[in-house]
Amino acid sequence: MNLKKYIFIFLFCPIILIGQNLIPNPSFEITKQPKTTPLYLPADWTNANTGSPDYITSLHTMVWGMPSNDLGYQQARTGDAYMGVLIYGLSGINRDPRREYIQIQFRDTLEKDSSYCLQFYLSLADSMQYASRKMMGVHFSDIAISSTNKFALPYTPQIIVSDTDYISDKTNWVEYNFEYKANGGERHITIGNFNDTTQIDTTYVGGGSKFFYEGTYYYIDDIYLGHCDSIPNDTLTSIAENQLFSVLKAYPNPVEEHFFLENNSKEGLQFQLYNLLGQAMDVSPNQNGKRYEFAIGHLPKGIYLLRVNAQREMATIKLIKK
């Protein structure tokens, strides 16, 4: 698929980094065999309440099949499976209080004051007439959180997905990245809508492949949690971006106070530095021939994305600020 380039979400890195993903079964490819029902379930993943997130896989047919299912048509980003989570439902002037969550235990405990990067992909189901923002949250906890009903869990998520923009893309898998500083001892992650029915922020998008549904429901795939220097690369980097990358050299990386960018092409370049929230950072490089010097000592520690624009090409370099 032709993924859109969202300035604050896509990471293009020149080196393939391999690190441990603390999320077991991150793309939902490992399945449990059906027992009392004909439905397969993803291994390791659980519900956090009595709602029922949907396991969408090519092993199923019709309702929860892949790529075609009752809520739309979407290929898995990788493999043959992904999950579907109801964010909220609308019925006339009433709002559906049901919530669905997915939850999993990490492979290892998070270390106090260590920074971890979280990455996953979302796509709005075709039949949904509304998109949301400030709705989907991510909650880290020492123990599994749970409820005996189907309503919103009474917890405050540490991460809110897309605080400013509505998540409305029904065609592409949109990538989201976040940085989380651990309190220490966290072993579980829970993803879903923690808001009650009075705090729903929606926008009408219309459409519907099979039927119209007044609500928001997202597909989710490829969840990564681990050290920030090992974020998976997007394998769909364009040829033009690879060509531009081949003439750029950024060093040192990680960065403390200054870093340099060498440009071995004849084209002039423009730059913008972003944090993982998509906020533009105020940096103006000093140019000396084909070398640019950036001063970022005033910025907080973390992951930054340097977007480099040439006349007809574009590249993004991931920088780690120590």
Image: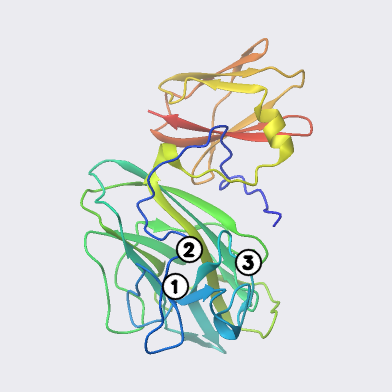
Nearest to viewer (mark 3 / mark 2): 3
Report which quarter residue 257 is drawn in. Answer: top left
Query: On the rendered structure, is 307 left or right of 220?
Result: right
Q: Residues within 10 Å of mark 2 (few under 14, many from 20)?
A: many
- At a point 61% along the width and 33% down the height, the residue shown is 272
- At a point 37% along the width and 58% down the height, the residue shown is 24
Residue 194 appears in the figure = no
Assign a secondary structure to mark 3.
loop
Residue named by callout 1: 199
- Which quadrant of the rendered structure holds the N terminus? bottom right
Assign a secondary structure to mark 2.
loop
Residue named by callout 2: 134
Front residue (pair 245, 138): 245
Residue named by callout 3: 75
Instruction: Please state which amino acid type lies under the numbered disc 3.
Output: Gln
- At a point 39% along the width and 72% down the height, the residue shown is 101
Q: Earlier in the sequence, mark 3 or mark 1?
A: 3
Q: Earlier in the sequence, mark 1 or mark 2?
A: 2
Q: Is residue 260 above or below residue 206?
A: above
Nearest to viewer (mark 1 / mark 2): 2
Q: Is residue 282 above or below residue 107?
A: above
x, y percent for residue 189 = 33, 61
Query: On the rendered structure, is 267 left or right of 195?
Result: right
Query: On the rendered structure, is 160 left or right of 213?
Result: left
What is the number of the mark on residue 78?
none
